[in-house]
Amino acid sequence: MISNSRFKEPLVEQAVNYLKQGKLVAFPTETVYGLGADAKNIDAIKRLYKAKGRPEGHPVIVHLSDINQLPQWTNSNLISKSAEILAKSFWPGPLTLILPKTNNVLLEITGGQNSVGIRIPRHPIAQALLKAFGSGLAAPSANKFGKLSTTSAKDVSAEFGHEIAMVLDGGFCDVGIESTIVDCTQENIKILRPGIISITEITQALANYNLENTILSADTVGTTKAPGNLASHYAPQTPTIVLPVDRLLERLNLEENSGKKIAVLALSPLNIGQTHLIVAPNDAHKYARALYSNLRELDKLKADLILVEEVPHNEMWAGIVDRLTRASYVVQ
Ligand code: TXA
Ligand code: MG
């Protein structure tokens, strides 16, 4: 359950004041923390890209409190039936839809494209903030570009310190990995980033309305518009390798015998003595919830290498497999 106990109205008011002044405020969503800026204020957007270290041309998601705000951002004449159904089925929630934008949406937040990423999060503090703000918040995940997303206010503060005006503390994020992104700008929808909402759920939601749609996955898309789809992303500072458990143990032995300090993120309860070990829950939802805080904790140990035990390769784990692959990708 999402901790609701830290919700405090004066803090939300304060956050809105900062946002109206063009400052940056981090806030919790059910997926990961977002770093929010007024999506209609170009100076605020510049500040956001600078704080994140994000290259221009990489679009950010606009967060809204409810679908009544959609017409300000998306071109309702061009919204497909499947986009409508997905919005109805999964919002508020961990889903982002790429939709045709209206002319007044700043090109600076869309990476110069004619589409805009929209998400309506369900976290009560995100909802309270967005309602009180009354407009869209551009909010990438609250981490430096290419690094691990943050799932607690403490991790956001460690990442940004005084570079941002405020962090609204909503405890730990419930989902733990970023939203599923679905590109709805073409007839065939495309999954640009897998997340906790699976392809089966998306197919089912469309089938409930008798809509059969070809769904292309990120793999079939090839070059995509999402920086989350860069091969190396969501990465710890420490080199990270994913291996099946037998090969992980072999590698561990080898590295430790040559004097290396190794940290391990396992699924199996391994008996490996002094090695820095976190055993993560063997359940996709629980594993996802703890993934970034576990990797951040292992990263802090400043080991020579993080070894991650391979997770099941099935649909339930698709979002996790994707993030682990990117976390462990070595730039050639
Ligand atoms: O769960 C989430 O989605 C979190 C929370 C804070 O909402 N946000 C998040 O934002 O992960 P970010 O910026 O780290 O990742 C957003 C992804 C990027 O890969 C970006 O390229 C893609 O969304 N995106 C945004 N607008 C897009 C557009 N118009 N076309 C294609 N991709 C877009
Ligand atoms: Mg991100």
Image (cartoon, helix red, strand yellow):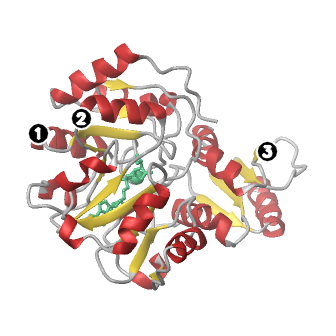
Question: Can you say whether 199 is above or below 213 in the image?
Answer: above
Q: Is residue 180 left or right of residue 36?
A: right
| Camera-nearest label, 3 or 2 | 2
Farthest residue, direction top: 10
Crowd around label 2: few <14 · some 14–19 · many ≥20 (10 Å) = few
Residue 144 point in image, percent of width and height: 37, 45
Left or right: 269, with 20 as reference point: right
- Location of residue 161 by image quarter: top left
Tell me the crowding category of disc 1: few under 14, some 14 to 19, or many 20 or more residues within 10 angstroms, Cα based: some
Closer to the camera, 70 or 228?
70
- For the residue pair 102 and 14, the one nearer the viewer reads as 102
Disc 3 to disc 1, how far (Cα)? 47 Å
The residue singled out by tag 3 in the image is 275
Q: Quadrant of residue 80?
A: bottom left
Helix, strand or loop under label 3: loop
What quarter of the picture does the N terminus occupy?
Answer: top right
Q: Which mark is residue 134?
A: 2
Question: Which of the two labelled residues, at mark 3 and mark 2, occupies the earlier sequence position?
Answer: 2
Which circle's residue, 3 or 1, is located before the other in the chain? Answer: 1
Locate residue 181, reporting x and y percent: 42, 64
Disc 1 designates what residue? Answer: 43
Instruction: Decide if residue 229 is in sight here.
Output: no
Q: Nearer the viewer, residue 57 or 257?
A: 57
Who comes first in sequence, dot 1 or dot 2?
Answer: 1
